[in-house]
Structures are given as C-alpha cells and as structure tokens.
C-alpha cells in the first residue's frame, strides 16, 4: 500500500538538501483554479479518463513513497507535466479539478520532502534507481514471486522514464542505461497471461515445451508474406496538406496473425491477447489427437478440423440464404495461413461480441462481410497511392462501429419489456432480432458498413420474420458453436 507519511526504510545516504528545489520547482499553470483540499483518495485513482496514460506514473509514486518521498514527488511532477501536455486548456471532463488537486499536493510536497541520497534531484533519482534495481530486480530474480517481480519491473520502467526527464541525456550513468535495457528485455517474462506465457523468453514453462503447443505458436507466427501495414497521418510539415502513410510504430508491430488482424480491423488489444491463447490451445488440443508432431510443424488436418467445427453454422447459413461462402482461397496466400486468418478473425469477432453472441446468424453476417473485407484488403494492397502498404484502423474500431450499434438496439428492446410485464408484441427479443439475418434482404437493407438509418436500428419498427422459425435450418450457435470445439473435436 502506498503511504504519504514516509518512513526510514529504504536506501540511506548523505548530503544536506537545499532549502528549496530550483530544478523541479512547482509553479501554477495559467489554466488552474483553486480547488478543494487534498482528499485521502490515492491520486492514481482520481485520474480522468482522458488522462489515463499518467495513471501508471502516479501509481508508482504511491508505491515508492515510503522508500523515497522525493523521488515520489518527481514522479508526480512528471505526471503533472504529461497531464498538462495532454490537455493544456483543461477542457476535458474532470481535468481541471484533477490538475488543481495534483498541483496543491505538489506544492506541499516540494517544501516537505527531503532528499536522502544526494544534494540535487538528478543525482537523487539516479542513485535511487540503481538502489531499486539492485534491491528488487537483481536481488528478486531468484526469490521473488512472479506477481511481485511483475510489479517491480513496471516500477523500474516508469522510474527510468521519469529519470530521463529529470537528468540530461549526457549525464545519465552508463550503468543506468544497461539496467534499463535489461529491464525492458526481461519484463516481457512477467506480462500477465491466462495459461500460456507466450512472451516469456527466460523463465522455463512446462506447457510451452509441449510439441503441439510449439507447433501451434509457430503456425500463427508465419506473417512474412502478409501485406505490410501503415498508419494514416496528416503531417503537413514535410508532406504538404495531403495525408500520407507512415509505417506502424513499434508497439503496434506484427508478431503473429492475430496482431495483423488487430491492426487491420481495429479490435481491442486485450481481446487479441485472450484469443491468441484460445487459438493456440484449440490447435494444440486437436493436434494431440492426430499424429504427434516432432518437428514443431502444425499439420493441415489439425487446422481443417478446427475450421470445420467452427464454421459449421456459418456454412449452413450461407447455404440457407443461397449466397456463396467467403471461406475461399486468396491468390498468393498459403492455404493453412488463410484458414488460420479466418479462424482468428471469427474468434476475435466472438471475443468482443458481448450479448450479440446470443444472435448466431448476426455473427455469421458480421463475419461474412469482414471476410469479404479481408479479400479486398489482399487484392487492393499494392497500389500507387500506398506503395504496397495498407492503412490500418485504430484500436476499438470494431467495438465502436459494429458491436456498439447492435448492442444499443438490444438494450432499448430490453427496456421496452418493462421487466417482463409488457406484451411480447411490444418489444423484440434476441430471436426476433436474429431473424432479421435469416433473409438475404439483410445484405441490401443493412449493408456493410452498416447503415445507421437501416430499419434494424429503428426503435419503433416491428420487424416481421421473413420465414417461419420452423423453416430455419442453420444450427444454433449454442448447439454447434464455439463451445462444441472443446467438447466434440
């Protein structure tokens, strides 16, 4: 727990501090107004949504305050500077109040905190960083628990970011540079995971040594022949007034097929992490029932079995609507890689579908159109405009543009039933809304991207099913859907 009182535990040192800090002295910003006195709530829990990126820094300040109050102050100062850069006019909701609260706290701590290790802030934070690395990173690698080491690596990473803003680059100790590189390299071993530590490079894990797991991981990491991706930018300094495409940054690099789908369609990062483990385990489970893999190469039969089970309802839906399936070959793409892209795409759709999962034919409609987008993506990748690079969508694009509009319809219909007392003719349940996708007319009426003025989204529309329920043949998702893969394959 964070403490604001400070104790004598932690590194000791000499050097009498000056009366006031000149290098990191707190001054009022012109956008600030007087606010309430400090409250007992931790400042990392008060961060407005628009300033979410500074929360880790404030959390670290709370964690290390009992070790070195002055370094904790420097962390909060850095967080305040980042907050002001993110919203200099304090126009966001709750931003002005939060910045005022943090400003009052910084002014009080600037006078009250004392240095323990050196006579200046740059030397203080460098010595503390070296002490923290030796005490918790180097000393904890043998006896530290994984969850504890994960926290220490995160703290060390944030401390280094703060250190670089306090200390000029030419005055940073070489030993600190070496430690910082070591932290960045090893902290991937402590990334949170469910079952598979996919990013651990040093720590041995028995499950990661299973040949079928290795084969599945190797298969989804085959991305060399996929179209390259670029972000859209509107930099006017070097490129005039016309937007241009630039390569994706490092934190959005493509390590496997699911990373690539994430960038192309704009899924949530957490969903990608979960479905990556999901897909690897599905493939590994099916692979164990086939001939054992000794060369860590996934058999095509394994992928075909998973694909056939996963898309059984989709193929029935296509057959019922008499529309061609979009599970087709793409020129220049290997069969197994393409099948894994289809499987990964469906799992990512399912992972963010929320209550839309109760509408299996709606999921078929979404996948059908997104698979068609995938085809166009490969066909149109090489062009004079992009120079062989394809533009990507931002994170949460799929949730915002596809799932949220459908979810809002479901929510409005639930509100109409008045706790189950309203007549069924007054509102639509999951089955009623799902019947909208039992007719081929949904392609024309709803379209893709979905038309916001389509009758599906009209609140007062009483939709009539195009066919009787007894005539509908595609299997339900809860009968032949995702769950059956784990149980029946």
Image (spheres, rainbow, N blue to C red):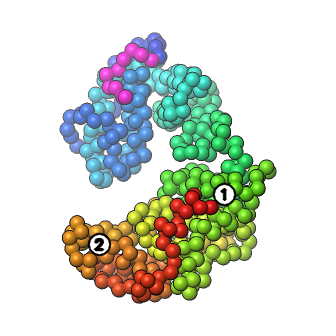
Q: Residues within 10 Å of mark 2 (few under 14, many from 20)?
A: some
Q: Is residue 337 highlighted in magenta?
A: no
In magenta, the rendered stretch is 1-10
* Residue 232 % position (x, y): 54, 64
Nearest to the observer: residue 113 or residue 57: 57
Task: Give the overall secondary structure of the magenta segment.
Answer: loop
* Residue 8 % position (x, y): 39, 14
Nearest to the observer: residue 273 or residue 291: 291
Give the quarter of the figure containing the N terminus: top left
- Measuring 35% from the left and 50% from the top, which residue is drawn there? 49
Q: Is residue 7 highlighted in magenta?
A: yes
Q: Can you tell which quarter of the image residue 310 is in?
A: bottom right
Q: Provide the secondary structure element on which disc 2 rests.
A: helix
Residue, disc 1: 286
| Above or below for 339 versus 81 | below
Q: Provide the secondary structure element on which disc 1 rests.
A: helix
**Is 72 on the left-hand or right-hand side of 483?**
left
- Measuring 53% from the left and 84% from the top, which residue is drawn there? 320
**Is 21 on the left-hand or right-hand side of 210?**
left
């Amino acid at each position: 727990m964070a403490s604001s009182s400070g104790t004598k535990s932690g590194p000791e040192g000499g050097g009498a501090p000056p009366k006031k800090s000149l290098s990191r002295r707190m001054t009022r910003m012109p956008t600030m107004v007087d606010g309430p006195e400090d409250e007992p709530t931790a400042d990392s829990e008060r961060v407005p949504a628009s300033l979410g990126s500074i929360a880790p820094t404030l959390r670290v300040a709370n964690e290390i305050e009992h070790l070195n109050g002055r370094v904790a102050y420097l962390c909060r100062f850095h967080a305040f500077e980042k907050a002001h850069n993110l919203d200099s006019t304090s126009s966001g909701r709750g931003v002005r109040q939060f910045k005022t609260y943090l400003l009052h706290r910084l002014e009080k701590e600037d006078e009250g905190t004392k240095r323990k290790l050196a006579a200046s802030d740059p030397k203080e934070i460098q010595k503390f960083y070296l002490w923290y690395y030796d005490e918790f990173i180097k000393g904890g690698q043998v006896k530290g628990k994984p969850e504890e080491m994960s926290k220490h690596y995160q703290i060390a990473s944030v401390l280094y970011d703060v250190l670089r803003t306090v200390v000029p680059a030419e005055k940073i100790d070489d030993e600190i540079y070496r430690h910082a590189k070591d932290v960045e390299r090893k902290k991937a071993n402590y990334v949170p995971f469910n079952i598979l530590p996919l990013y651990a490079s040093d720590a041995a894990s028995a499950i990661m040594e299973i040949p079928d797991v290795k084969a599945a991981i190797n298969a989804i990491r085959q991305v060399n022949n996929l179209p390259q991706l670029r972000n859209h930018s509107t930099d006017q300094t070097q490129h005039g007034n016309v937007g241009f495409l630039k390569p994706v940054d490092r934190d959005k690099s493509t390590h496997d097929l699911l990373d690539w789908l994430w960038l192309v369609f704009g899924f949530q990062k957490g969903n990608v992490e979960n479905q990556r483990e999901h897909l690897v385990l599905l493939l590994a489970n099916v692979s164990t029932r086939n001939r054992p893999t000794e060369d860590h190469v996934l058999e095509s039969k394994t992928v075909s079995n998973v694909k056939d089970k996963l898309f059984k309802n989709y193929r029935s839906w296509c057959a019922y609507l008499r529309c061609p399936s979009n599970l087709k070959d793409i020129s220049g793409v290997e069969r197994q890689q393409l099948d894994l892209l289809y499987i990964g795409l469906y799992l990512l759709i399912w992972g963010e579908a929320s209550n839309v999962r109760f509408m299996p034919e709606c999921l078929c409609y979404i996948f059908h159109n997104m698979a068609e987008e995938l085809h166009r993506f490969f066909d149109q990748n090489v062009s004079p405009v992009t120079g062989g690079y394809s533009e990507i969508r931002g994170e949460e694009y799929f949730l915002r543009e596809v799932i949220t509009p459908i979810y809002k319809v479901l929510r409005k219909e639930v509100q109409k039933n008045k706790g189950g007392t309203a007549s069924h003719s007054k509102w639509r349940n999951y089955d009623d809304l799902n019947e909208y996708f039992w007719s081929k007319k949904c392609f024309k009426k709803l379209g893709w991207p979905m038309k916001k003025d389509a009758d599906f989204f009209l609140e007062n529309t009483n939709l009539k099913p195009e066919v009787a329920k007894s005539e509908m043949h595609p299997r339900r998702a809860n009968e032949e859907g995702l769950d059956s893969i784990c149980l029946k394959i």
